[in-house]
Amino acid sequence: MILTVPVTPEGDVDPRFGRAPAMAVATVEDGVVAEWQVHEVGWDVLHDEGSEGQHHARVVRFMRDNKVERVLLMGAGPGMLRTLDKLGLSLVQVPRMDAREAVLAAARLDQ
């Protein structure tokens, strides 16, 4: 399963999904993180450059390019939630915690 989560430099879940500077993409296989990549997306800066539609399109491209199946987030606005829902992604709300631990917990939801 491929999951993504906004991540702080310290490795915690970042509360700023649509304005996250970095997103981690994790592949979980057999209950362990098999791959972990942090992408500097710059959504914190890009969010206010251009229209809301342009920003949502950036997020959609990221999800598709990384073949994301499940999104972890602390929260997002209604427009962003609609956009993610249209992609058919599984959304999991998580508290501020270690991002890797959150990914493993979210991957177990199907078990």
Image: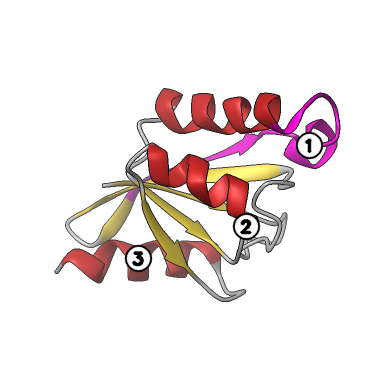
| Amino acid type, label 3 | Ala
| Amino acid type, label 1 | His
Q: Label 1's element?
A: loop
Q: Label 2's element?
A: loop
Locate residue 110 relative to residue 25 in the image: left or right.
Answer: left
Q: Of the two numbered discs 3 and 2 on the same chain, state the one appearing first in sequence.
A: 2
| Amino acid type, label 2 | Ala
Locate residue 71 relative to residue 80 in the image: left or right.
Answer: left
Q: Nearer the viewer, mark 3 or mark 1?
A: 1
The magenta stretch is 34-52
Above or below, 111 relative to 84: below
Q: Position of residue 73 (x, y in %)?
A: 54, 60
Q: Position of residue 82 (x, y in %)?
A: 50, 46
The residue carrying pointer 2 sits among few (fewer than 14), some (14 to 19) or many (20 or more) residues within 10 Å by Cα, namely some
Q: Position of residue 97 (x, y in %)?
A: 58, 74
Label 1 with label 2: CB-CB less than 8 Å = no
Label 3 with label 1: CB-CB less than 8 Å = no
Residue at 61 percent of width and 64 percent of height: 75
Locate residue 94 relative to residue 55 in the image: left or right.
Answer: left
Residue under label 3: 106
Q: Label 3's element?
A: helix
Q: Nearer the viewer, mark 3 or mark 2?
A: 2
Q: Nearer the viewer, residue 83 or 72?
A: 83
Figure label count: 3
Residue under label 1: 47
Q: Of the two numbered discs 1 and 2 on the same chain, state the one appearing first in sequence.
A: 1
User: Any magenta on residue 50?
Assistant: yes
Q: Which mark is residue 76?
A: 2
Q: Quadrant of the C terminus?
A: bottom left
Residue at 56 percent of width and 70 percent of height: 98
Q: Which mark is residue 37?
A: none
